[in-house]
Amino acid sequence: MSSAPTPYPIGTPGMPWGEAERAEWFSRQTRQRSYESEVLSVIEGLRSRFDVEEYGHLDYGTDQYPLMAIRSRDWRDDVPVMLVTGGVHGYETSGVQGALRFVDQHAAAYAGRVNLLVAPCVSPWAYERIHRWNANAVDPNRSFREDSPAGESAALMQLVAPVRDRVLMHIDLHETTDTDESEFRPALAARDGKPFKPGAIPDGFYLVDDSANPNPAFQQAVIDAVEPITHIAPADDSGEIFGSAMVARGVIQYPLEQLGLCAGLTPAPHKTTTEVYPDSPRVTPDQCNAAQAAAVCAAIDYALEHR
């Protein structure tokens, strides 16, 4: 007989957090890596080849974070916009590093054919603390909505707004990690005063399509491009991946806009969320970054071919 999950160390089971619980949670968060050295310095090195802009600024007490975007230098009104986002969840490392890798190694191949807009690290406070939430215990990837409670999400929405209706493809780069089950989902349940129901972490790469406007051929093109680099997640015994029905090999669906997810912030006909599995003994961090970059290339290539 399995034992009940250990209660999360903050809060009272069954009661949503108040200010005291959020303050206690915040007090436990420590900086574990540097946004400046791992992200900003890399972006600075790209200035000679791309346009770089600060599209927002986060102020969390003594912590200040410029929000940076990278654009094609040859921006043109007669070619489509391709949107790449990473680090909406700061702890999902390959989302950030994969986006930067794409810009450095692959973006030049699309010069003159597309307008690239890349926001590689949407949540820098969380990137430094290897966390899912922002400093207010808010998940930016449930906050892409009017009057957003997350500054990270609001700033990205403002950046994208002028070209929102011209975005042909949007790929949002994520990871599903073992800590989703050991830390982040238990914390979510505790924060919201709900019981934690244990699940299983998918062993491999998968994609999240838009259930409101599914695009199965687009998803398949991305899966095919990533498979030589990292293995694709199989369905579990219930035919699901992380609690959602697998609609095609390595593909599940969410109502992206309804849930306030980043991938739903534009009406782009080609959109997806990647989910790399970095905790597998079968992959390295470099493979995870390469898989994300390959997914971006495949997504752009498919969108260009099926305009």
Image (cartoon, rainbow, N blue to C red):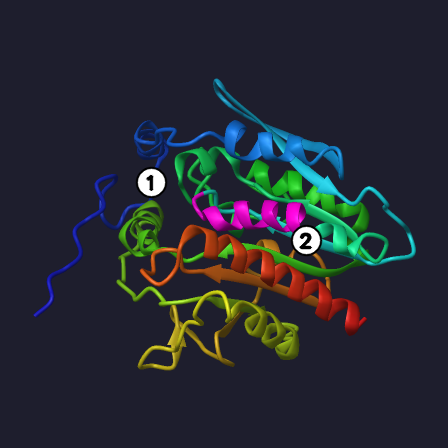
Q: Which residue is drawn at 30% across and 66% down?
A: 200
Residue 164 x/y as whole percent: 77, 53
Q: Main secondary structure of the magenta part?
A: helix
Can you identify the residue that label 1 sits on? 17
Are there few (<14), some (14-19), or many (20+) residues within 10 Å of tag 2? some
The secondary structure type at the circle numbered 2 is: loop
User: How many other residues sit within 10 Å of disc 1, few (<14), some (14-19) or many (≥20)?
Assistant: some
Marks 2/1: CA–CA distance: 44 Å
Q: Is mark 1 on a helix, strand or loop?
A: loop
Q: Name the residue under label 2.
A: 106
Residue 247, x across and y down, in percent = 50, 80
* Disc 2 residue type (three-letter): His
What is the magenta range? 91-106
Q: 191 or 14: nearer the eye?
A: 191
Residue 58 is at least partly visible in this image = yes
Which percent across, then down, holds residue 106? Answer: 68, 53
| Left or right position of 181 against 52 | left
